[in-house]
């Protein structure tokens, strides 16, 4: 009988102490390699997550500053606005002070819808026994401009601006009736309409022919003290209620004096000079 001691150490059926040690070593190396790979993966994940973490995890004090828009060209304000003529701006009105503080103009706070159109009129001459009429040019005209924009009220300043805008539009549809000194009997004043830069609406002389204010029934109405109180003042105090959201539409009719019309030149109009300097449309 062959015993374990009598077996050949080089045979495949028995492992020596040397071969066992080599196997253990290889297994240990494989385990260490996987552990190191796992650790390096964890370290990479931690490093990526801690990119924005300040040193020692102590946040630094941050300072904030007011955003400022610097106009290098000096005239890049493309907001839609209606100017306040001097004859109205000189009147003593605390209601319209928000418009005076915004550059003596009514600025639509949100981009409004603007509709304008032009037309050329022709008369037709229809000779007897002819298939086609002949058209003779009569004149050209610029139709009324319709501007409609939303007003949202969140603060007392917004409410004051809404009241000022409505008061101003009411004023532009009234003549100087009664005792107004040198202005007595004058019609409603001419305003300047601006919007969208140099070659769209640039100081277009207009008169306000009508305006509409939508005061919906399905929105909240905020009480405000125009004299300087906050929105939501005490119910026992007198105040003014304004809608949280409303739509104001204004119809402006461009109007030009005879002197300006006589100076019209089509070449200057095509080059844009009359659009940006005289307000022609």
Image (spheres, grey):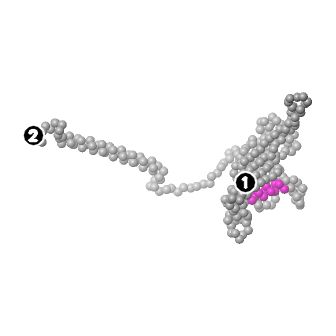
Image check: 18 left or right of 205? left
x, y percent for residue 219: 68, 59
Q: Which mark is residue 247?
A: 1
In reply to whether residue 47 is colored magenta, the answer given is no
Give the distance between the C-alpha atoms of the residues marked 2 and 1, in whole angstroms: 109 Å
In reply to whether residue 169 is colored magenta, the answer given is yes
> Height in image: 273 above or below 93?
above
Q: Residue furthest front?
A: 129
Q: Earlier in the sequence, mark 2 or mark 1?
A: 2
Q: Residue at x 64, y 51 (%)?
A: 68
Q: Residue furthest right?
A: 128
SS category of the residue bearing label 2 = loop
Q: Report whether residue 97 is seen.
A: no
> Height in image: 272 above or below 96?
above
Q: If the image is split into quadrants, where does the C terminus sit?
A: top right
Number of marks present in the image shown: 2
Q: Which residues are magenta?
A: 163-174
Q: Which mark is residue 2?
A: 2
x, y percent for residue 179: 89, 61
Q: Please identify the quarter of the rendering in which residue 280 is found.
A: top right
Give the main secondary structure of the magenta stretch: helix
x, y percent for residue 54: 47, 53
Q: Please identify the quarter of the rendering in which residue 183 is found.
A: bottom right
SS category of the residue bearing label 1 = strand
């Amino acid at each position: 009988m062959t015993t374990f001691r009598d077996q050949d150490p080089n045979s495949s059926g028995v492992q020596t102490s040397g071969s066992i040690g080599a196997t253990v070593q290889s297994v240990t190396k494989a385990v260490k390699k996987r552990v190191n790979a796992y650790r390096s993966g964890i370290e990479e994940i931690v490093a990526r997550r801690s990119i924005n973490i300040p040193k020692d995890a102590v946040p630094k004090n941050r300072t904030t500053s007011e955003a400022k828009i610097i106009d290098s060209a000096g005239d890049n304000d493309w907001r839609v606005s209606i100017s306040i003529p001097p004859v109205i701006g000189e009147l003593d009105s605390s209601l319209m002070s928000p418009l005076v503080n915004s550059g003596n103009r009514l600025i639509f706070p949100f981009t409004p819808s603007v509709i304008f159109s032009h037309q050329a009129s022709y008369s037709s001459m229809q000779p007897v026994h002819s298939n086609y009429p002949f058209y003779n040019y009569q004149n050209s005209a610029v139709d009324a401009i319709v501007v409609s924009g939303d007003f949202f009220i969140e603060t007392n300043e917004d409410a004051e601006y809404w009241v000022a805008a409505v008061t101003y539009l009411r004023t532009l549809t009234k003549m100087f009736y009664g005792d107004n000194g040198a202005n007595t009997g004058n019609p409603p004043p001419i305003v300047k309409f601006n919007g969208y830069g140099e070659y769209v609406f640039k100081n277009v002389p207009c008169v306000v022919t009508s305006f509409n204010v939508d005061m919906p029934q399905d929105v909240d109405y905020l009480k405000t003290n125009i004299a300087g109180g906050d929105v939501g003042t005490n119910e026992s105090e007198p105040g003014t209620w304004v809608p949280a959201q409303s739509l104001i539409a204004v119809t402006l009719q461009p109007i030009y004096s005879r002197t300006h019309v006589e100076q019209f030149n089509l070449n200057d109009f095509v080059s844009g000079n009359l659009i940006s300097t005289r307000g022609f449309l």
